[in-house]
Amino acid sequence: MPRPGQLLARGVCRHLRTHGFAVLEEFSPERGKRVDVMALGPKGEIWVVECKSSRADFNSDAKWEGYLDWADRYFWAVDEAFPTDLLPDGTGLIIADAYDAEILRFGPESRLAGARRRALTQRFARHAALRLQGLRDPEAII
């Protein structure tokens, strides 16, 4: 059974796909970091979305600011009952459920440096390909 944050991530991913984004859930841009959703847009833009299912979930996240260095835009995804006044100013806001989402607010754009964008895009592509291969051939040696 998926956890509440995973259900939010599913709705976010479905919505971002309608805007032409390729999405990965639980992606690690570097060792020690794991974002809930990383999205690669049709123009190469990179968005990070952190899904928070409750006040306690949000309050226990002390590392979210470290994700800002890995995205052109940063968003929180929460359900409609979440107290959005807790969320920091200057970040994006997505209201989601397990089936879809809506972007209510865009945070500021902070373009990644070219070298970081290239390395991150390559890591994204490699990770996506390995996940696909694992689904198609789960018995393969990894």
Image: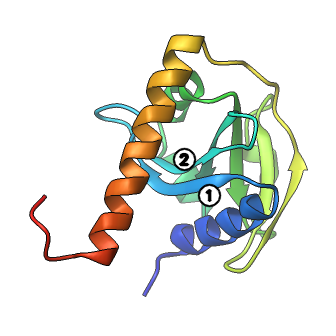
Local crowd at mark 1 within 10 Å, few (<14), some, or many (≥20)?
few
User: 30 or 57: which is nearer to us?
Assistant: 30
Q: Nearer the viewer, residue 109 or 141?
A: 141
Question: At numbered mark 2, what does the secondary structure look like: helix, strand or loop?
Answer: helix
Labelled pair 1, 2 in contact (Cβ < 8 Å): yes
Describe residue 31's horizontal placement relative to residue 139 as left or right: right
Q: What label sits on residue 59 in the rendered view?
A: 2
- Left or right, 65 with respect to 130, comes to right
| Whole-percent x, y for residue 97 in the image | 72, 75
Residue at position x 74%, y 43% in the image: 42
Q: Position of residue 84 (x, y in %)?
A: 79, 52
Q: Amino acid at mark 2?
A: Asn
Residue 112 image point, x, y percent: 63, 18
Q: Say what secondary structure mark 1 lies in.
A: helix
Q: Which residue is mark 1?
A: 55
Q: Position of residue 141 (x, y in %)?
A: 9, 63
- Pick whichever, 12 or 5, lies toward us: 12
Q: Say if 113 sits above or below 60 in the image.
A: above
State the residue at coordinates (80%, 62%). Answer: 95
Q: Report how far apart the C-alphas of labels 1 and 2 lie in the structure.
A: 6 Å
Q: Which sits in the foreground, 27 or 135?
A: 135
Above or below for 65 versus 36 = above
* Outermost residue toward the right in this view: 104
Q: Residue at x 79, y 24 (%)?
A: 109
The quarter holding residue 113 reads top right
Q: Tell me if 29 is positioned left or right of 12 in this view.
A: left
**Residue at 71% of width from left, 18% of height from top?**
111
Q: Is residue 26 visible?
A: yes
Which part of the image, by quadrant, shows the N terminus?
A: bottom left
From what the image shows, is residue 8 above or below residue 40?
A: below
| Residue type for callout 1 | Arg
Instruction: Say which mark, if any, is on residue 30.
Output: none
